[in-house]
Image (cartoon, grey):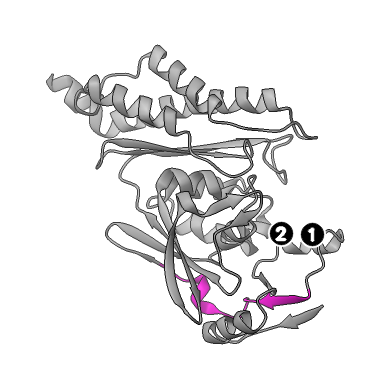
């Protein structure tokens, strides 16, 4: 196994063009496990650890540009208000040591359905900026996952950054695991309210071959909130709406049975997470916006 260690982003792109089978390594929290257990033996490793550009972030008026190697710890400490769903997901990643090393770019590159950041990214809405010596392009998150541990990257492309919509409303993330820490998710769910567009987005992890959105659940909830005037009047979400939303989220799953959990359990758990998160986020929305509207009605 050869080890490539570029000193700049331009050198990294050139190396990836020359050695398209090279596997990028930044935090190394996924690839090193596969190598240590002899599950993977790449011909080349492309070390991105010296590239400072990948550890930078910029908060804009509407979008935050997050470098692919920004550690989860930095997201938790600095972007809790701007990207609350992703910050919550970052809290659930492994151990403090791994949170200090791992970043969103690694989750995206591996494209494992169990990656903790995927549901939050899907719910928030984002684009993945990728680049090669041929140029750069933006891949919408909904088009990024193409199969089990497969993504839309070309062989000569590297992930540069993720452009994530800043939160305009409450966001949540929860996952179920076999213990409280250092655990791969049995399933995970993310929910984001977008009051500026009066829409809701979701993300499901570890309950389908790829991370997915519960689009039927979103469509149902968007219609229910609009028809009931909930965005304006700040009313409490009815139990029937929450129940239907959870059932539709559960139906969006396409899970498997494995050592961590059964398919039946995963579907059930996602439905519970969805229902609870809807109540949590809506109560938070009412607390900041809705009660004044309700009192004026």
Q: Compared to 175, does 8 lie above or below? A: below
Between residues 255 and 3, which one lies in front from this camera angle? 255
Tag 2 residue: 30
Q: Are marks 2 and 1 in contact (CB under 8 Å)?
A: yes
Between residues 248 and 235, which one lies in front from this camera angle? 248
Q: Position of residue 183 (x, y in %)?
A: 72, 43
Q: Compared to 171, does 216 lie above or below? A: above
- Residue occupying the point 40% across, 12% down: 240
Q: In this view, which residue lies farthest toward the right? A: 38
Picture quarter with the N terminus: bottom right
Q: Give the SS element for disc 1.
A: helix
Picture quarter with the C terminus: top left
Q: Position of residue 231 (x, y in %)?
A: 24, 29
Q: Give the SS element for disc 2.
A: loop
Q: Viewed as shown, does residue 57 lie left or right of 260?
A: left
Q: Give the range drawn in magenta.
A: 43-57
- Residue occupying the point 82% across, 64% down: 35
How packed mark 2 is, by other alpha carbons closer than 10 Å (few <14, some 14-19, many 20 or more), is some
Between residues 228 and 151, which one lies in front from this camera angle? 151
- Residue occupying the point 64% across, 64% down: 101
Tag 1 residue: 34
């Amino acid at each position: 196994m050869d080890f490539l260690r570029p000193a700049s982003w331009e050198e990294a792109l050139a190396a990836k063009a020359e050695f398209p089978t090279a596997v990028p390594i930044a935090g190394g929290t996924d690839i090193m496990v596969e190598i240590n257990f002899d599950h993977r033996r790449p011909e080349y490793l492309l070390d991105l650890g010296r590239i400072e550009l990948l550890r930078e972030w910029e908060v804009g008026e509407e979008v935050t540009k997050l470098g692919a190697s920004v550690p989860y710890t930095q997201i938790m400490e600095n972007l809790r208000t701007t990207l609350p769903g992703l910050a919550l997901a970052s809290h659930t990643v492994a151990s403090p040591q791994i949170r200090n090393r791992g970043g969103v770019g690694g989750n995206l590159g591996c494209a494992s359905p169990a990656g903790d950041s995927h549901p939050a990214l899907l719910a928030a809405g984002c684009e993945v900026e990728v680049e090669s010596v041929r140029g750069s392009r933006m891949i919408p998150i909904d088009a990024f996952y193409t199969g089990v541990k497969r993504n839309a990257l070309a062989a000569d492309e590297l992930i540069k950054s993720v452009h994530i919509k800043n939160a305009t409303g409450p966001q949540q993330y929860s996952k179920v695991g076999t213990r409280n820490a250092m655990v791969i998710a049995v399933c995970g769910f993310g929910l984001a309210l977008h009051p500026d567009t009066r829409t809701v987005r979701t993300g499901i992890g570890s309950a389908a071959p790829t991370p997915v959105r519960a689009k039927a659940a979103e469509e149902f909830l968007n219609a229910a909130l609009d028809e009931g005037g909930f965005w304006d009047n700040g009313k409490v979400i009815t139990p029937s709406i929450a129940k239907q939303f959870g059932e539709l989220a559960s139906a969006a799953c396409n899970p498997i049975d494995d050592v961590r959990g059964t398919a039946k359990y995963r579907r059930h758990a996602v439905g519970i997470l969805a229902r609870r998160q809807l109540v949590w986020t809506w109560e938070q929305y009412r607390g900041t916006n809705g009660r004044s509207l309700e009192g004026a009605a």
